Amino acid sequence: MHRTADVAGQGTQQGDTGLTGRFAFATPSRRLRWATGALLALGVATAAPVSSGAAASSPRMVSIIVRGAGPQCTSQVLNQVTALGGRVMLRIGLLDGGSALLPAQALPALASSSCVLEVTPDATMAPQSIGSYDPTTDVGSLYNTEVMIGAQTAWTKGYTGSGVGVALIDTGVAPVAGLTTSGKLINGADLSFDSQVSSLTRSDEYGHGTHMAGIIAGRDAAAVSGHYAGDTSDFIGVAPDARLLNVKVGDEQGVADVSQVIAAIDWVVQHRNDNSMNIRVLNLSYGTVSGQAYALDPIAYATEVAWRNGIVVVAAGGNNGGSSTVGLSDPAYDPYVLAVGADDTNGTVATSDDVCASFSSVGNGTRNPDVVAPGAHIASLRDPGSNVDLQFGSTATVGARFFRGSGTSQATAVVSGAAAIYLSDHKTATPDQVKGALVSTAAKLTGQNATCQGAGLINVNNALAVVPTTTQKFTSSTGTGTLENARGGLHIVSQRNGVALAGEQDVMGKTWSSSAMATNESKLAAWNGGTFNGAGWSGSGWSGAGWSGAGWSGSGWSGAAWSGAGWSGSTWTGAGWSGAGWSSADWSGTGWHGAGWSGAGWSNGAWVGNGWSDYIWK
C-alpha cells in the first residue's frame, strides 16, 4: 500500500496496481517487517528457512526488486542473489541493488542480509487507461489544460502535431505508459553523467524529463486518432501526434553543467533532419541567472543558432517570483526565443480569474515573458522510483500514474506542444511566425502586469488563423561571453576531491573558447561526429549517418559510452571518463541538485515554495 493524493487533495489509500514493486520504499528499521509483508503478497511462507540440504530440482522463482543499504553494498547484494540460487536481471544504480529472479524459499535469507534494506515484489504492469481518475474534475489535468489553451478545439480540425519533431533537452525519459506508443519517442544523445552506466543511459532517474514529455506529446496507445477531443479515458498530451527526441543532459540528481546544455542544443541543431525527424521545436525547461547580457551569452547564442535554423526554442522564464532585479532566466532572457511564464488557474477552468503564478519570474519591462501557460499543479506522467517521486510522491501522486508539478517548466512544455500543433498546420512557418502567432492571439490576464504575463495566456486554436509576416530584429548574440558567467553561480562539484568545475573549461576538462565555439556553431560544425570541443563525448555510434535514429521500442536503453579520456587541467583532475568515475553518486552541486530545471514544486495542494525552491529546480 502507498499513500496517494486524489484530485480533491484528500489522501486515499490505494494499492500498487500498475506499478512495479521496486517503487515502494521502507526505512531501514522496517526492513524485516516490510519484507515479511512482501513475502506474504507473493504467497510465500516466511516460517520456512532456507535449508542448505534441501533438494529442489526446480524451485519456484519469483521476480523481486532488492534495495541495498548504499553504493558500498550494491555488489554484495547482487552477489548474494546469485549465491542463493537467483539470477540478477538488471542492476539499478538508483536503488543500490537491482531486479532479480530468486527461489521463493530464499527470500527470508536475502531479506535478513545486513546490506539489504528491503525486498519487494516486482510485478510490472503497464496500465493503458486512466482508470478511476477523472480528468474533468481536476483543474490541473492535461484534459482541462488543453481546453483552456484551445488545443482540444485545434484537434477537432485535424491539427495534433503530426509530422513535427520536438526535442526535449532534459533529464531523460522513462518508459512509462503514455510514452511507449510506437514511434512516439526517439532516443538522441545522452550527454549526462549517467551515460557511463548502461542501465541509466537515456532513462530518467530524476523525474523531470518524463513529466515534460507527457505534457508535450504523451499519448496512451488506446487513444484513437481523430477522436482525441473529449477523450476522458486516456492520457493525451498537448500535441499527441508529435514525435519526441530525448536528449539527456541531467543525471539522476538533476545535475548538469551549462557546457552539457550547449552541447545538447548544438547536437539537436546538427541532427534536426536525421531520419526525417523534422525537429521544429526545442523545449528548454532550464535556466540559469547569467552574469552577462544575452548578446554575449554562449547559451543564448546556441539557442539563436537553433532559431535561425528553423527550430522554435521554447524556454522557461524561471521561478524567481516577482523580483525584477533577477529578471528572466538564461536563455529565456534572449528576446529571440519564446519565453514562457506560468499561469495559475486559481482552481477553476474559467480563465477570467487566472493570475500569474507567484513563483513565475517577472521581466524588467523591456524583456518580459512573451506568453504564459498553465503551470500550477499540472498533472502529467509519473516516473515511479525517480528522485522526485521518492521525495514527494506522498503528496504529489495523482491516482497511480500521474504526478502533480508546478513551475515554468510545466508551462514551457505546454507551449512547446502548442507550437507543434501550429506547425502541423503551417508546416513552412518560421520560428518568428510561430512566435508571432502565439503572442498576437494570447489573451491578457485581468489585472496582471505585463512584466509577469507578456501578451497573456496562449490560445493555439486562435493562433492557427494567424500567419504573421513580421520578423524579429533584435541585436543578435555573439556568444563571445564567458562560460563561467553563463553558469550564474551554479557549479558541479566532484565528491572525490571537492573541486568545482569553474572557469573556461567544459565537463571534459577542455579549454573553452567562446569565440571559437560560436564560429563552429554558426557553421553547424560544433559537433564532428562524436567529438565536441576537441573531445569525444558520445562515441562513434552517434556520428552523422552512424546514428540510426530508430524509434524507441521501449526496451533498449543502452548506447555507446562517451569516449573521452581522463580529465585534464591543473585543477580539474582525478577521474577517468568511464564507469564509477562518472556515476551520478560522484557528483554534487553547490546550489545544484537540479537547480536550473524550472519546475517549481511537486504538490497537489498549495504551492510549497520551501519544498522546491529556486535552488532545487530553479
Image (cartoon, rainbow, N blue to C red):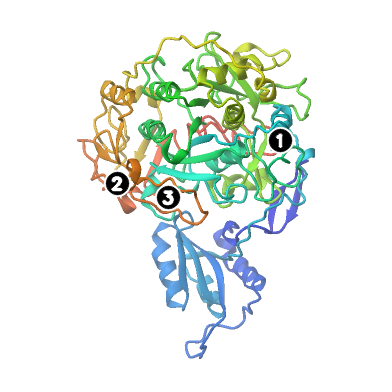
The earlier-in-sequence mark between 1 and 2 is 1
For the residues labelled 1 and 3, say whether their Cβ atoms are less than 8 Å apart.
Answer: no
Q: Give the residue drawn at x 31%, y 24%.
A: 523
Residue 427: in sight, yes or no? yes
Report the Cα–Cα distance between label 2 and label 3: 16 Å
Report the Cα–Cα distance between label 1 and label 3: 31 Å
- 553 relative to 149 in the view: left or right: left
The circle on residue 201 is 3
The three-letter amino acid code for the residue at tag 1 is: Gly
| Residue 213: quadrant of the picture | top right
Q: Percent from the top left, x then y, of residue 458?
A: 66, 22
The three-letter amino acid code for the residue at tag 2 is: Ser
The vertical placement of 461 against 364, above or below, is below
Mark in front: 2 vs 3: 2
Where does label 1 land, which residue? 140
The earlier-in-sequence mark between 1 and 3 is 1
Count of marks overlaid on the render: 3
The three-letter amino acid code for the residue at tag 3 is: Thr
Q: Is the residue marked by circle 3 packed among few (<14), some (14-19), or many (20+) residues within 10 Å?
A: many
Q: Give the residue drawn at x 39%, y 14%.
A: 295
Q: Is the residue marked by circle 2 packed among few (<14), some (14-19), or many (20+) residues within 10 Å?
A: some
The circle on residue 154 is none
- Viewer-closest of 421 and 614: 421
- 245 relative to 131 in the view: left or right: left
Residue 141: in sight, yes or no? no
Where does label 2 land, which residue? 540
- 182 relative to 86 in the view: left or right: right
For the residues labelled 2 and 3, say whether their Cβ atoms are less than 8 Å apart.
Answer: no
